[in-house]
Amino acid sequence: MAPTLSRRVSIDGIDLSPPAPGRLLPPRAFVSPAVYEAEMRRIFDRGWVHVADLPELRVPGDFVASTIGTTPVVVVRTHDGAIRGFVNACRHRGATIAEGRGNCGRQLRCPYHAWSYGTDGRLIGVPSREEFEGCDLGDMNLLTIRTATAGPMVFGCLDAAAPSFEEWAGELPVALQRARGDEMELAFEYTYDVDVNWKVYVENGLEGYHVAIVHDVLNDFVETKTARHFFESWSSYTHAFIKPDYREMIPPLAHLSEEEKTYVRFGHVFPNLIPVLAPAEFSYLRIDPVAPERIRLVARSFDLGGDLAGLRDFRREAIDRTNQQDIGVVTRVQRGLRARGLPAGAHSSFLECRIGHFEQMVSHALAVDASDALPAAATARVETSILREAVLREAHRG
Ligand code: FES
Ligand SMILES: [Fe+2]
């Protein structure tokens, strides 16, 4: 893989060039504040990030405040029924105009000096407007961001030059459409604050190597050794077969093929979303970076309700139990990665191949912005197709 992706990337004295096959990025890449800051600018500011879910944006005025890396954003259901996204910063002096989620009625109103914006982002109210005489407020609307939906999820993107969401998310939008994901309701959610670098938690979600050792319920449920892996430019997927005992628990689903009822799709949408699509439900983990060694983990689960909600209680317990088991091991990883002088680790060629793919994407994204030789979009298009083939070759070598 190294010959095709030879550009050197170094931040804070840490070599972030694409690791050799089977090797990992250096431990300091998971603790360095400078690397973290570069990732916010070069990865999160430039990609598609999950920001909200449709069940919380049902009626006009519903809003969800979220973040894309370090940029606060707000997503709104407008009065003409569309989903719109904005940078969540007042154009007056920058206060966030929304926090949490709720319904704003016909306007988003800044709590500081009460500038107000329509749900389409237009500035519609300025108290004591005459005070701004001589200052053109005509272009002081909220800054718009790109939005896209897949199943019950809403994504946002700050970068006009980023690829389309369909290209970014790979097979997931179509799979969610087949599973009637946009009709799903929120069944339950958990949030956890965890002392790890965001990449450590993502990598844990990309591999089945630990499942038999760390997870009881998940290990009973899926077969990891026979899984199939799929790589896309900015996402990857593992299709893991459901063990026979559990297949009997799946309710009748006329909208899916027999084959689609046999496996669970564990995904990764770069940078920080781990979607998990099972035949009768959909869940995700979103890993929100908070600091170099801290994340907020958002776990949500959806289903079609009615009879299909019958397994909710089982799932609610199983997902929390599985998350707690993961938190137990990943926090140990983070503590170990602080060890002075620890060399880069290794990843296995089949069960952990998607970690290799992820670290290639991280390295690639950090390198793209470092170069001003080519327009960013062209660089990304050429090199990610090389990347995909290189990673596939490596995956098949195992
Ligand atoms: S900062 Fe929003 S109105 Fe002043
Ligand atoms: Fe796990």
Image (cartoon, rainbow, N blue to C red):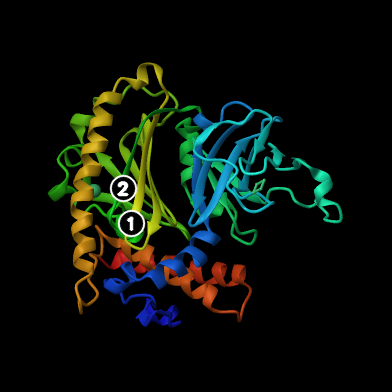
The answer to whether residue 276 of the structure is visible from this angle is: no
- Which residue has dot 1 on it? 294
Which amino acid is tagged 2?
Asp
Is 18 displayed left or right of 169 in the figure? Answer: left
Is 166 displayed left or right of 214 in the figure? Answer: right
In this rendering, the answer to whether 205 lies above or below 27 is above
Task: Tell me which residue sits at (24%, 75%) in the image.
Answer: 344
Camera-side residue: 290 or 42? 290
**Res 35 → quadrant:** bottom left
**Res 107 → quadrant:** top right
Q: Position of residue 32 (x, y in %)?
A: 35, 71
Task: Tell me which residue sits at (61%, 81%) in the image.
Answer: 373
Residue 193 marker: 2
Is 119 displayed left or right of 254 in the figure? Answer: right
Task: Tell me which residue sits at (18%, 66%) in the image.
Answer: 336
Camera-side residue: 244 or 353? 353
Circles 1 and 2: CB atoms closer than 8 Å: yes
Quarter holding the C terminus is bottom left
Residue furthest top as drawn: 307
Camera-side residue: 36 or 236? 36
Circle 2 residues within 10 Å: few <14, some 14–19, many ≥20: some
Residue 112 marker: none
Q: Position of residue 252 (x, y in %)?
A: 35, 21
In this rendering, the answer to whether 395 lies above or below 312 is below
Q: Position of residue 120 (x, y in %)?
A: 71, 39
Camera-side residue: 59 or 4? 59
In this rendering, the answer to whether 73 lies above or below 187 is below
N-term-proximal mark, 1 vs 2: 2
Quarter holding the N terminus is bottom left
Q: Position of residue 66 (x, y in %)?
A: 50, 45
Q: For numbered disc 1, what is the local secondary structure?
A: strand
